[in-house]
Structures are given as C-alpha cells and as structure tokens.
Image (cartoon, rainbow, N blue to C red):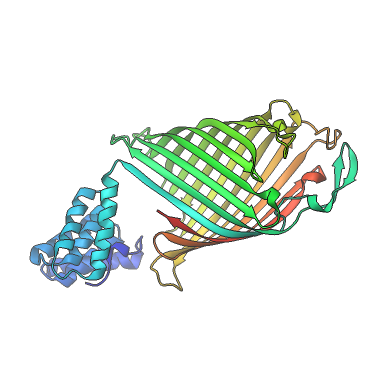
Amino acid sequence: MARDIAQAPPPPSSEVQQQYEAAFQETLRKPADLDVLFHFATLAAQTGDLEGAISALERMLLIDPDLPRVRLELGVLYYRLGSYEVSRTYFEGALKAPNVPPDVRAKAEQFMADAISKQNPSHFSGEAFFGWRYQSNANLGPSTSSVRLFGQTANLNQGAAGAPDWGIVSSLQVRHVYDFGRQDKAALETQFTVYANRQFTQSQANVTLLDLTSGPRFQVFANSFEDMSVRPFLSGGYIWVNDTPYYGSYGGGIETSTLLGDGLRGNTVFLFRRHENQDTAYLPTNSQFRGTELSANSNLLYALTPRISLFANGNVQRFEADTALWQSYQLFGAGGGFAFRFPDPVLRTGGFWTFAVNAAVQWWKYDSPDPTVDPGVDRYQNDTILNVTASIPFDDRTTLTVSGGRFNRTSSVPNYAFTNNSLLFGVSWRF
C-alpha cells in the first residue's frame, strides 16, 4: 500500500480502465482484503471514480482503523472533491495516529493548511519571477541607419541604431479572491502586477510597469452553459521608461470565460483604457501619444489529450490620439500554438515538464502620415512573433523557465522596421 493515490496521473488509458474493472471484480470476491481494496482505490482514482476510491478506502478503515496513510488518501480525495471540512477530519485523524510515517505527516500538514485556506472566503495567491534576458536589438532600433526625416533621407547616429544587450527581468503578480459564498460562485477578483527590467547598457529600454484590475466574477446562463462566467472590472496603471514617467492609464472592461465543449474553453476581454501622457525633459513630445484605447482579445484553449493542448487567439485594437492624428492606429492580430507536457525525465520530481510553441502576426495601420517623419507616406507595419518556451518545475512552487523568441517588424517607413531575437531564462515561485 505504498503507492500515493493522490499523485496518480490522469486520465486513464484503455488498459487502466480494464485493470479498474478487473480490480472491482476482485473486491467482490475478496471484500476484506486490504491490499485488494487499496489497489482498487488507486485505479479508481486514476479513472476519475473518486467516489469509488473513497468507498474502498473507508471500507479499509472499518476493517483496520489504524491506517494513517489511508486516512491521508481519503483526505486528499475529499479535498479534490471540494469537501474541505470532511478532508480536514481525515488529515487530523492521520496526524493523531501513533507512529505516523514522516512523509505522511508532511503531506497531511500541507493539505491541512491548504484545506483551511480554502475554507476562508478571502484567498491570496501570486507568482514572482526573476531572470536574465539577452536581446539582439534591446532598444528596438531600426534595421538600417538610413531613415526618413521631414520627407528626406537621413542617417542615424550610432547611438540610435539597434544594439544588443543583456538585462535583468523581474515581475510580481498578486491575486486576491473574495468568495461571496453564493450559488452563482460570485467572487471579487483583484490582481496587482509589477514588472521591471534593467538593461546593462541600453538604459533607454528600461521599463517599469504597475497595473491593477478589480471586479466581481459570477456565473451566468447556468441552464445553457455548464460553466460560463462574466467579470466586469476597473483598471489603472502607470509606466515609466528609463525611470521617466511615460503615461498613466485608467479604464475598465468586461471578461467572459466559457466552457464551450469537452476540453474546449474560450476567454474574451473587452477593454477601454485612457492614456494620459505628459511631456518631460526626456520625452518632450510625449503628449502626442495621449488618447483612448479600445480593444478586444479572444483566446481558445483545447485539451487535445491529457498532455497536449492547442491554443489560438485573435485581437483587435483601436487607439485614437487626442491631437496628433498620425499616432492614431488600428491593429489586428492572430496567433496560436501548442503545449506538450511530459513526465520529468531528469530530476524525478514527479512533476511534468512543459514545452510550448506559439506564433502570432499583427497588422498595423495608422490614420495619417507623420509630418516630422515623411508627410507623403502612409504608415503600415506588420509584426511576426515566434516564441519557444520550456518550463521545468523543481517542486510544486518553483519553476525554471527558458524561452527563445524572434520579433520581426516590417514597415512602410524604415524608421520603425526592426528585428529582435531574444533569450530569457529565470525562476518563478508561486505562493
């Protein structure tokens, strides 16, 4: 009975299903055999029959109450079912048993703390990341030194051209959920995000960002959709470039999340955001970018198999500048990719490594030519974005991420065309 039921990999193969049915027949022939009952409980958990696994384990306790590992497994199964109060009683029973194995005690204490937290209507969670990034064009300078200025050809100085650089990247996301305890699963969700990067030489590419969103989420159309939620929200934020104020923003929107079918989920966000850019000594024409942003973003995620997921997304955005019409634009984008999970082949943590590939394209169209660049040329630009990411967990909370990417922009105005290849590696910690 040493196998850990809680870590049984889902979902079952046809072979596991056959083993489950054979094990069930064996329990009918040997209803008091502890090894037979535990084997069936393990297979039942693998096939998703949590109630069957619970029934078998509870029968074991009727035969022999002094089984702390079985009490632990029962607590975990009830935890997976969302019955946190019942799960706590089993964890307490496992911890009170004499001669509790160290691994059972450690796991029972961990799940006990999680179960207590789940019963609290107020939940905090988050993720911190710290890493290093190399970019072949850190300041996103033009691909060529020959650019346009007032409709004439001009040559950039060396400092304005694209340059490679290493930098440090860090981020922090803190999420708070307050459960109102209603049948429509209404909850107030708030997320605070901090992002900052510091380049080793190209300080003009330093960016600091603060962002806060908050709003209630609740289920709707329960009779039509198995799981559909709506979340209206308010948002606000601020961005600094090279430690100089760039713009503050405020707005709001609405998010919908829907289970569209077996393994298929859709998420859509509509957003209104006001940008308040102010001129500074470092950015003397920054007020040109003051305006209003309207956007819609939709994502689809499909679990093709337990280990392979496919995803696709589309977005549209409209930005209207208050005064500088040549800074107004509309953007259309589309992308997709896949993620593949496989058991840890090296560290033997019991977790899964994830390998993901995604690609996207974006099309930009500006309302009118920029008179300071080239008054006779309409500005169009296209982006092609490719990223490959590997995620390697060290434990349930800590993950190493390695990512490589390429961002290529073509433009009708050479000032804005560039290519940037990047390599990122770092460690994240969930709490």
Q: Give the side of residue 47 with respect to residue 385, left or right.
A: left
Q: Residue at x 62, y 45 (%)?
A: 334
Q: Position of residue 370 (x, y in %)?
A: 80, 34
Quarter-of-image position of residue 10: bottom left
Image coords of residue 388 (percent x, y): 59, 59
Image coordinates for residue 44, horizontal then vertical, percent = 25, 61
The one of 117 and 198 positioned closer to us in this rendering: 198
Of residues 12 and 343, the one nearer the viewer is 343
Q: Is residue 21 visible?
A: no
Seen at 50% across and 44% down, the residue is: 193
Can residue 153 be seen in the rendering of this structure?
yes
Q: Residue furthest front?
A: 281
Give the residue at x 87% y 36%: 150
Position above or below: 108 against 370: below
Q: Residue furthest left?
A: 63
Taking the spot 34% from the left edge, 62% from the top edge, the residue there is: 12
Q: Specify whether 359 is left or right of 344.
A: right
Using the image, determine if residue 383 lies above or below residue 91: above
Residue with the most extreme top position: 323
The N terminus is located in which quarter? bottom left
Please tell me in which quadrant of the rendered image residue 188 appears: top left
